[in-house]
Image: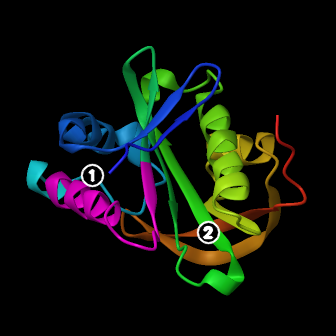
Amino acid sequence: MTELKLNTERLILKELDLKDLHDIHTLHSLPETDEFNTMGIPSDMGVTERLLADWLGMQELEPRTRYTFKIECNDQFVGLIGLKNLGTPNYRSGEVWYKLHKDFWGNGYGTEALKCVLRFCFSELDLHRVEAGCAVENIGSIRVLEKAGMVREGMKRKKLPIRGEWKDNYFYAILEEDFQVN
């Protein structure tokens, strides 16, 4: 199988492999990156190993229903970005998510990686619609979504289970005709 790799001016997005376990576990263990995440901090490395095994297994499926990429800048692990819910072909839609290491926040990497994945969605996967969601308090993620051209379509009340509380969720989308290839 050929390694799927996407490039931007500053970033390389590559599909995961077993060597990424430590970086993924570190990312998921940071309280700052977990603040708005429904998964929670993994209790041990085994939790992260099972998650990575699931993502690696998805690389083998035909047709593909998920993609998970590591984001790198100058050979440094910046974070993760993924695309999921590609299961119903006639809808031609998917959902994106991302998580960046706190040391790389504020550099535009999230927006750059998201635009790259959206380009992949519309040009390579021929999707019609891509969605995303985020907690209403997650200002950083809101900025990333809006800078990438996604439109806030509404809010779902108490949708996200985060650290024992139900949080409201904004939902965003972008259509193929809205996406400007840069």
Q: Is residue 8 above or below residue 46?
A: above
Q: Nearer the viewer, residue 42 or 178?
A: 178
- Answer left or right for 49 relative to 68: left
Could you classify mark 2 by the number of other residues whose Cα lies within 10 Å: few (under 14), some (14-19), or many (20 or more)? many
Q: Amino acid at mark 2?
A: Gly
Q: Which residues are magenta?
A: 48-68
Instruction: Identify the mark at residue 24; answer none if there is no mark.
Output: none
Element type at marker 2?
Answer: strand
Foreground residue, 80 or 35?
80
Residue 169 x, y percent position in the rendering = 63, 67
Q: Position of residue 101 (x, y in %)?
A: 42, 32
The residue to which callout 1 is attached is: 41
Q: Secondary structure at mark 1?
A: loop
Numbered circles on residues, count: 2
Label 1 CA crowd tier, 10 Å (few <14, some 14–19, many 20+): many
Residue 31 drawn at (x, y percent) = 35, 41
Mark 2–mark 1 Cα distance, whole angstroms, equals 25 Å
Q: Quadrant of residue 11?
A: top right
The residue that label 2 is drawn on is: 94
Amino acid type, residue under disc 1 in the picture: Ile
Left or right, 122 with respect to 78, comes to right
Question: Which marked residue is nearer to the observer: mark 2 or mark 1?
Answer: 2
Q: Is residue 17 above or below residue 156?
A: above
Query: Up-down: is 85 above or below 15?
Result: below
Residue at the spot 54% in from the left edge and 27% down from the top edge: 105
State the image coordinates of residue 78 (x, y, percent, origin top left): 43, 28
Which image quarter: residue 53? bottom left
Residue drawn 65% across and 77% down? Answer: 157
Let me know if residue 19 is in the magenta part.
no
- In the rendered image, residue 59 lying in the magenta stretch gets the answer yes
